[in-house]
Image: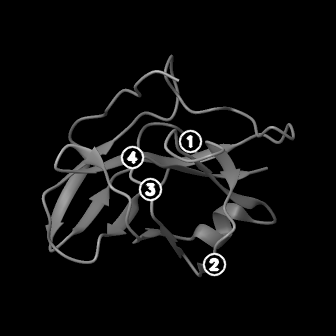
Amino acid sequence: MAKQDSVPGKVQNQGNGKFKIDKGDQPNEADVDIDLGGAGNYVVEKLKVNGTNGLPKKMPDGKSIRWFNNFSIKENGNYIKKKYTVTINDLQGRLGNGSLVIYSETHTPPLYYYDGTINGDTFDLDDGDPGAGGAP
């Protein structure tokens, strides 16, 4: 997949490695809070979830995906590869009986069901180029 388009004006740096990424204009999108665990030379961008360079619409098993947000985190020009915390308000309600889905070109496979622990509205990632959504 080609480079995904950024959406300017949607990221708020709250200091000390904490960022708020505002939702885009798609119906299922949600605001996301990320905590990188301390200050750093981070560049955080909101990315589009649809369009020419958008995220996949279905899982390999055919289930439709509702994308909640898509963003990138770079440090010193490279996607980060360190653990950080993601919070999506009412994540459990958004998922319903579905599963959390992650898409990242830096992960193998790039599109997968999240297999970590979800604590209420919070989960951990270690990849700087994720899209997060729910299926079905």
Q: Residues within 10 Å of mark 2 (few under 14, many from 20)?
A: few
Q: Using the image as rendered, state which of residue 24 and residue 133 is in the foreground.
A: 133
Where residue 90 sits in the image (x, y, percent)?
56, 71
Q: Residues within 10 Å of mark 3 (few under 14, many from 20)?
A: many
Alpha-carbon span between mark 4 and mark 2: 21 Å
Residue 93 vs 57, above or below: the answer is below
Q: Using the image as rendered, state which of residue 75 and residue 95 is in the foreground.
A: 75
Residue 27 disc label: 1
| Amino acid type indicated by mark 4 | Phe
Alpha-carbon span between mark 4 and mark 3: 11 Å
Count of numbered labels shown in the rendering: 4
The answer to whether the residues at label 4 and label 3 have Cβ atoms under 8 Å apart is no
Q: Is residue 30 left or right of residue 18?
A: right
Residue 117 disc label: 2
Residue 19 vs 120, above or below: the answer is above
Residue matched to label 4 = 71
Q: Earlier in the sequence, mark 4 or mark 3?
A: 4
The residue at the point 44 percent across, 68 percent down is 86
The answer to whether the residues at label 2 and label 3 have Cβ atoms under 8 Å apart is no
The residue at the point 44 percent across, 56 percent down is 127
Q: Residues within 10 Å of mark 1 (few under 14, many from 20)?
A: few
Q: Earlier in the sequence, mark 2 or mark 3?
A: 2
Which of pointers 3 and 1 indicates the residue nearer the eye? 3
The residue at the point 34 percent across, 52 percent down is 22
Question: What secondary structure is found at the residue carrying circle 2?
Answer: loop
| Amino acid type indicated by mark 1 | Pro
Where residue 119 sits in the image (x, y, percent)?
58, 83
